[in-house]
Image (cartoon, rainbow, N blue to C red):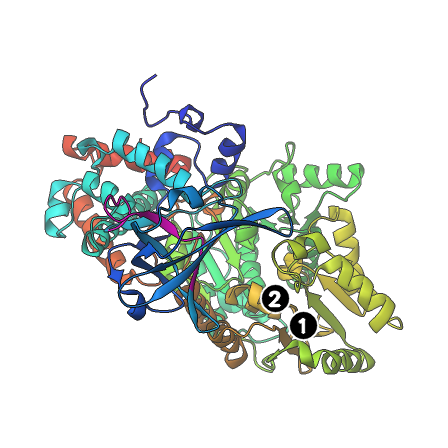
Amino acid sequence: MPLAYDTPVTELPGVGPVKEKALAKLGVTRLGDFLTLYPRRYEDHTTLYPISSAPIGVNVCVRGYLTKPATLSRIPGGRQMVRCTIADDTAAIDLTFFNRPYVRNQLEWGRSYIFFGKLDLSRGRRTMVNPQLEPADAPKLFGSLMPCYPLSAGLNNAQVAAWAQTAVNTLAAPEMETLPPQVLTAHGLRDAEWCCRQIHRPDSFDHLQAARDRLAFEELFHLTLGLSLLRRSREQTPGTPLTAGDPADFSALLPFALTGAQNRVIGQCAADLSGTVPMNRLVQGDVGSGKTAVAAFCLWRCAKSGAQGAMMAPTELLAQQHYRTLRAMLEPAGVTVALLTGSLTPAEKKAIRAGLAEGEIQVVVGTHALLSHGVDFHDLALAVVDEQHRFGVDQRSALAAKGRCPHILVLSATPIPRTLALIVYGDLDVSVLDELPPGRKPVETFLVSESKRQRLYAFMDKQIVEGHQVYIVCPAVEESDAQEGDPTLKSVKAYADHLAKTVFPHRAVALVHGKLRPKEKEAAMASFAAGKTDILVSTTVIEVGVDVPNASLMVIENADRFGLSQLHQLRGRVGRGAWQSYCVLVSNNKNPDTRARLKTLCATTDGFQIAQADLEQRGPGDFFGARQHGLPQLHVADLGVDVRLLSRAQTAAQELLAQDPGLEQPEHAPLKHRLRQLFAQNAHMFN
């Protein structure tokens, strides 16, 4: 059958069940998906170096002839090796090909070839291992920029490049265009078909840059246009104004003074809640910045206005912690607070469900149990979601669906640079708590190598002797997980066992990781929170955890394996008590860029500064995944470097909507269709 956009990849030559599964890991299930599987880099086959002046340590193109016939030999392990020497008029290179015996027959003595590979020096001689090669008198690769695609196990670049080229040759056409002609002209952008062909097989670096700029602009234009329509759709939805309860009266309920940042954000929330458009606000701030107090104000005002509020947390322990905090704050003011989690008895759940349905319970705190069938509210007017990135957009919507267009408050301890927050939380207004309560001591952070291991163990023991507790975070769960990529990786199971038996047999050591059953995880965390465990060895499952003020030391093994923002989140587990707390980053990585990145964390405790550095150094990637926020992913645009492009795209989107608010003009039909595809989870806004 003829190939089309929706043709399954299994229709392509060479794609069987194994390759189909490997491509699915890259997000490619249809032929059309190859169009947006963009190369991650390009090999430069455009420059031909004389061998004597070719740079060492990088991939280069050289031309040479065989000085004598190639030899084939067997080496230990059943492998085969072809060796030969090539030369030009300036110097020679020793070539080695492993497990490619056919190369001996490809190479003719005295004939000239072009080779592409990494040039190294060994004992004073130039060498190349497994270079690409082709006859110099009939080159196919030389003179081009060769795309290198993302790969998964079972795929090689030549295969993926061939399939991608099939997709481009079949599907690239003028009908691909979604940008209106006036936008292309105003911003000097090339057409979609040309860009599609150039991004996959560029003619030159200039053409590659032009294609990349247009595709990045297009992504940001689609995104900002869709977000504008999403916000407009939300603003047309009637909400329930919650006007009772002055912020000053709420402050008087608290046994502590609110920070200036808390007062500012509470004021923003109060204005939102008073309006006829439902609040849709993200409050982000570092651990300990006081997000719970902001949520408490909103829930208090909701109850004072005669309605109900719900707060959803990702774990039972966190839900219990919020329940205790909110109960202490709100019950003295006459607000009824309840807890609904999966571990309650059937009778307890039944009683709480009845209280919610009848309106007797004004505020409920819970886990996913709040979303269960049979949990009905008398009048849910406010939904608070804690640690938003632990929930999918569908779960946030499911909680909101329990009421009539309730106000939404989202809390996140993951600091995100504002440009990225606009993308990740595009339909939310963003508030930032950028001030910690007075008296908090910043966590002192140190970067150490493996050679300081014994001193580190002594420091850990000293903290425990002083009555405190210690977290240790490892990047892997099983030894096999660690060995696969790097034998120096610490695995939770083996390391916890080693610490308990050899290093700290006199201390209580426990472990927690994602492969444990939820009840086992909860029990381990509860034991640590209760002070029964001295050392908790964990994977990053404790990144979002309960408040354990007694924990004073966070040790992060193989710290170079984590992003800066994640390291900062882990560091936020300590420093919650009145005493000095510490974070020790353990890494033997000698790479200067890696060490500079980790030293950023030692130099500051400002989460937003760290997040900005992370964005600049690593790029945004897919910060939480499209599944988490319901917005289209960025394949080309990089918010670390494309801030100006974002500004241009936002301006273009605003100008277009001013001219055609509903995208109803015939020439905008392709654009509207594309937005429907990208914002499938919010398709109602185009009705």
Say if mark 1 contacts mark 2, CB within 8 Å.
yes
Q: Position of residue 492 (x, y in %)?
A: 73, 59
Q: Would you say residue 428 is visible in this rendering? A: yes
Q: Residue at x 45, y 41 (%)?
A: 102
Q: What kind of element bears circle 1?
A: strand
Q: Nearer the viewer, residue 526 or 154?
A: 154
Placement of 676 over or under 526, stated as above or below: above
Please name the residue that numbered disc 1 is placed on.
Answer: 554
Disc tally is 2
Q: Earlier in the sequence, mark 1 or mark 2?
A: 1
Q: Position of residue 99 (x, y in %)?
A: 52, 46
Q: Nearer the viewer, residue 95 or 546?
A: 95
In which quarter of the view is residue 609 placed?
A: bottom left
Placement of 192 over or under 112, stated as above or below: above
Is 627 on the left or on the right of 39, as rendered?
right
Is 40 on the left or on the right of 387, as rendered?
left
Toward the right, the furthest residue is 506
- Amino acid, disc 2: Leu
Q: Position of residue 568 (x, y in %)?
A: 55, 69
Q: Would you say residue 686 is visible in this rendering? A: no
Disc 2 crowd rating (10 Å Cα; few below 14, some 14-19, many 20+) is many
The quadrant in which the C terminus is found is: top left
Q: Which residues are magenta?
A: 127-142
Q: Position of residue 30 (x, y in %)?
A: 40, 30
- Amino acid, disc 1: Met
- Alpha carbon of mark 1 to alpha carbon of mark 2: how far? 8 Å
Q: Residue at x 50, y 73 (%)?
A: 591
Q: What kind of element bears circle 2?
A: helix
Any magenta on residue 140?
Answer: yes
In the rendered structure, find residue 570 and report the number of the disc placed on it: 2
